[in-house]
Image (spheres, coloured by chain):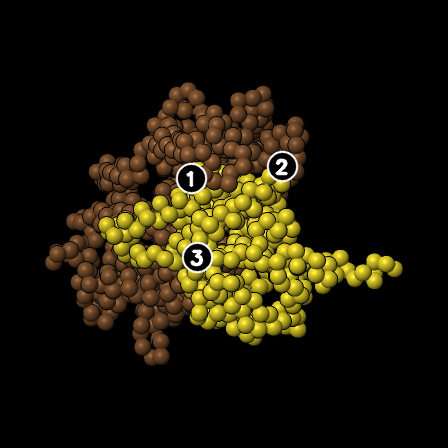
Chain colours: A yellow, B brown
Amino acid sequence: MAEKLLELQGISMAFGGLKCIQALDLDVGEGEIVSVIGPNGAGKTTLFNLITGVYQPTGGDIVFAGKSITGLEPHQITRRGIARTFQTLRLFLNMSVRENVMAAAYGHTKAGVFRSMLRTPGMRREEQEIRELAEKRLAFFGDRLMGYRWDQPAYSLSYANRRRLEIARATATNPRLLLLDEPAAGMNPKETQEITDLISLLRTEGGYTILVIEHDMHVVEGISDRVIALNHGIKIAEGSFDEVATSPQVVEAYLGTGGMAKK
Amino acid sequence: MSGGYDDELSRPLEGALEASTSEGPTSPAVGRDEWVARHGDNRTRRGGLLGTVEARLRVVPWWAWLATFVALFCLLPVASDSGYVRRVAFDIAIYMLLALGLNVVVGWGGLLDLGYIAFFGIGAYAYAFLSSDHYGIHLPSFVSIPLVVVIGATTGFLVGLPSRRLTGDYLAIVTLFFLLLFLTVTTNGDDLFGHNVTGGANGLLNADPLSLFGHELPPTLEGGLFNPAYMYVVLAVFVVVYVALRFVNLSRTGRAWRSLREDPLAAEVMGMPVNSLKLMSFAFGAAIAALSGTFVTMLSASVFPLSFSFPLLIIIYTMVILGGSGSQPGVVLGAVLIGTLLELLRDPGDSRVLFYAAIVLGVLGAFRFSVKLAVVVAGTFVFGFVAHSIAGASDNAWVNGSGGEGGGVADFAANWVIVPVHVAAWVAPVSYVSLVALALVLTLLHGWARIALLIPVLYLAAFVWENVMIAQPEPTRYIILGVILIALMIFRPTGLLGEKRVEII
């Protein structure tokens, strides 16, 4: 395995008495695609919220690129190079498609308010760069988000296109690690196939390391270097897709115990 | 106001198509999106003369609109030498500035700031502290105005601090509390720990006029007329603020503001420091409000706590909502429309003409040219004349009460609406309440039943207008603002020039 990019060391998260994540160790190597699976309520999205700083862990440490990011504000973590998409889409619906992506460049751009008021040459140059970056990120999706769609408000997009736009927006923060929360949810089989190809392409062409939550096992099988299975906030299996898929604990978590089934 | 609707938009698409055909499928796109490729054919456009005008107007750049608007505004004092018109023009220019400032907080930041008027007041008082006889400090305008702006921004920053934790209704309550605190302190500020700070209800007097390059600009000309130079100064400030804010809105800061309005969590996770952006938007709005406050103090040479009360807050909010919260041209249009309307409503003649024009346009808009329109118009006319002659036949005192201004409209109203010489005390509340109740019943009815009820309701509306509302212009102004807001919520929730808004899909 390549160098570790993200490392979770004994992370715990509890809401009152409810332990969502318990002493979880997890690492993602540079350039890897790792999938997280598990039944509903297993703590997958909570895991993402912990990594991105939306929640502060009740115990343990999160290390990104060799430095601890525990306790940082979400926007600081994003600037370090972690971007995410949301399972329940959270686009800026009343802004144009292009502006959605341009907005995400905030963290790695500098022009202040007063420079913007005066439209200094430096500010205009930076603005042009942001624009080109956004158009490049949108062009990644082929025709889907091209042309006149750039100036349309995000609410006019179809569900699948909104998912694509969320990915484009996340990549505009220039991340090293991309967290995708159920990228194939709500897509038809053709679009699911497309997103599977796309996630591989995000690694080869975009150079991102990817941690993905997915329920669709075909997608998981198609993309993953490594699969991690969670249940009740505990890691119950880790390894290649085949190893995890045949693991008795995983089968039990999804289908119940064999003993129960026989009765 | 985006220019070049057709040309600009189709160009990138052509480029994209070329790229994908020449290089083959460069992307994982499985199956081309045919609808996108043929989007040009799918777009409907208004035809005829109206369509041509619309297409031409779209190409006009934003600065041309702004320049035309400002030029027309500048002509007002030339076109009319009435001091009243000039004074109203000044007030409207102040409203435009205030609406621009509120638009930053509410329209872009998405923060419900009900303390906004307090910053206006803080600016007005701060100027009076820095340039008047009150403390004997007489700073020149080019020093005191920037100072006031800084003071306004700082207070906005401090009041915005709770917004780090509060959103929506809770923030509204806290800021409203701040406005009330401001009013309480200024009203009782003549004895603040033994010092006379704000002059209390008597306010502060003898504030300095604007001084430009060593020259003092007198607020009134010889003969006591209002000096239109002040209007030009405020208008110039308006242009600077408008352009500066437009540039900010189109920069990364503006995008970040609008992102946090749409979804604060997503904005934060996309790398935008939501808390400091909120504070910045608060400070910006407050600074602009404070800046407007200085001119009001200069012009009237005095400042009173009552000028910054709750009704003014409602007026500014109505302007922003009517014009389209988030749209700069929209809120300016809202300020002009509401500002003019409120002035017209002060005058019984003008407001009478406005009222009947609004009714006619409303009925026309609801029914277009149809049989129903003919029935409603004819029915209402006949209903009125019959009611009027029956009342007149029984006792002349029932119909002889009218006789107001408003030219032909007033003559018509005198022969059509029952206006008794003496209105019994119970008539006003009963007729008003039943008008509201019947208007609500109207919304429950459909078809001809609605039309049958609409006729007496229209007549009742005219009756209430002539007998109750016209006699009390102050409350009438606010009732009309309320009606405008309700109508907007129903027919055009985005405001006149606002972009389409969806909350959650």
Q: Which residue is drawn at 63% across and 37% down?
A: B442
Which label was assigned to residue B442?
2
Q: In screen coordinates, is A219 left or right of B13?
A: right
Q: Mark 1 points at which residue?
A: A151
Q: Residue A94 at x, y = what percent?
A: 47, 45
The Cα atoms of the two marked residues, 2 and 1, are separated by 41 Å
In the rendered structure, which amino acid carries the disc numbered 3?
Pro
Element class at badge 2? helix
Q: Which chain carries label 2?
A: B
Q: Residue A203 at x, y = what percent?
A: 48, 52
Asked whether the residues under the numbered discs 2 and 3 touch, taking CB atoms below 8 Å apart as contact, a structural biologist would say: no
- Single out the residue that lies furthest toward the bottom: B194
Quick one: label 1, few (<14), some, or many (20+) residues within 10 Å?
some
Is residue B357 something that shows in the picture? yes
Q: Which chain carries label 3?
A: A
Q: In screen coordinates, is B294 left or right of A263?
A: left
Q: In screen coordinates, is B274 left or right of B66?
A: right
Q: Is residue B54 above or below residue A43?
A: above
Q: Mark 1 lies on which chain?
A: A
Is residue B264 something that shows in the picture? no
Q: Name the residue under label 3.
A: A175
For the residue pair A121 and A235, the one nearer the viewer reads as A235
Quick one: label 3, few (<14), some, or many (20+) residues within 10 Å?
many
For the residue pair B12 and A211, the one nearer the viewer reads as A211
For the residue pair B143 and B52, the one nearer the viewer reads as B52
Q: Which residue is drawn at 49% across and 32% down?
A: B36
Which label was assigned to residue B200?
none
Please tell me if label 2 and label 1 are on a single chain.
no
In the rendered structure, which amino acid carries the disc numbered 2?
Leu
